[in-house]
Amino acid sequence: MEFFNHLEPLLKTFWFIAIPASIVFILQTVLTFVGADASDGADADFDSNLSGTDTPFQLFSFRNLINFLLGFGWTGISFYESITNKTILILISLLVGIMFVIVFFVIIKQIQKLAENNSFNIANTLGKTAEVYLTIPAKKSGKGKILISVNGSFHELDAITEKDEIKTGSMVRIIKVESGNLLEVETL
């Protein structure tokens, strides 16, 4: 602690911001890689009214506060001897802190582009081919079943046809989605 006693008040403030922010940042990073961090940050106590937007994370979160303080504190320490005008030093530190938040935002946005939605949507079956699993009766007089691959997974779905009976093992094309999960098919 003797190190801090001989520092000027502004430099001491930068150190008291940078050290705790660095410790929390390291803990957040370790917890993220271990899988203990399941959200973007602490919930805010106010309504930020961001519910209808495409923002990938909350602007006012604990993680963003730590990112800002990290950039602000270490910039102030790094340039304290180089920049003699303390107002300019504080402004540059503020800008770097804001840049840390913006860089984090850009990184999260790029990571979200890697996400893939593999949830099944029956509309994705239209125009695709499938194999008849259980015979489909003629002229919508009953239901049969087809096997179709959508997004890399196989689905067994009910099917009907307007035309003649379609035997098991035949290849069909989905031409229409009827009510619910019922598909209308035709032979290839």
Image (cartoon, rainbow, N blue to C red):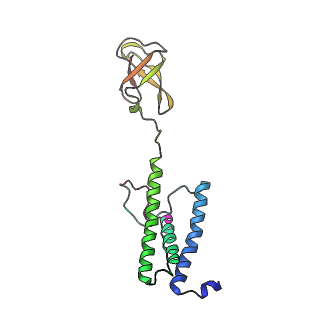
Picture coordinates of residue 180, whole percent (x, y): 39, 30
120 relative to 24, above or below: above
Residue 57 lies in the magenta-colored region: yes
The residue shown at (46%, 70%) is 97
Q: Residue most toward the front?
A: 82
Picture coordinates of residue 86, whole percent (x, y): 44, 83
62 relative to 142, above or below: below
The C terminus appears in which quarter of the rendering? Answer: top left
Q: Is residue 62 visible?
A: yes
Picture coordinates of residue 20, whole percent (x, y): 57, 73
Query: Foreground: 6 or 153?
Result: 6
The N terminus appears in which quarter of the rendering? Answer: bottom right
The residue shown at (63%, 84%) is 3
Query: Foreground: 182 or 71?
Result: 71
133 relative to 16, above or below: above
Picture coordinates of residue 87, whole percent (x, y): 41, 82
The residue shown at (34%, 16%) is 162
Q: Which quarter of the picture shows residue 172? A: top left
Count of numbered tags: 0
Residue 177 lies in the magenta-colored region: no
Q: Is residue 44 visible?
A: no
Query: Foreground: 39 or 143?
Result: 39
Q: Residue most toward the right?
A: 2
Query: Foreground: 101 or 59?
Result: 101
Q: Which residues are magenta?
A: 53-63
The residue shown at (48%, 51%) is 111
Task: Give the overall secondary structure of the magenta segment.
Answer: loop
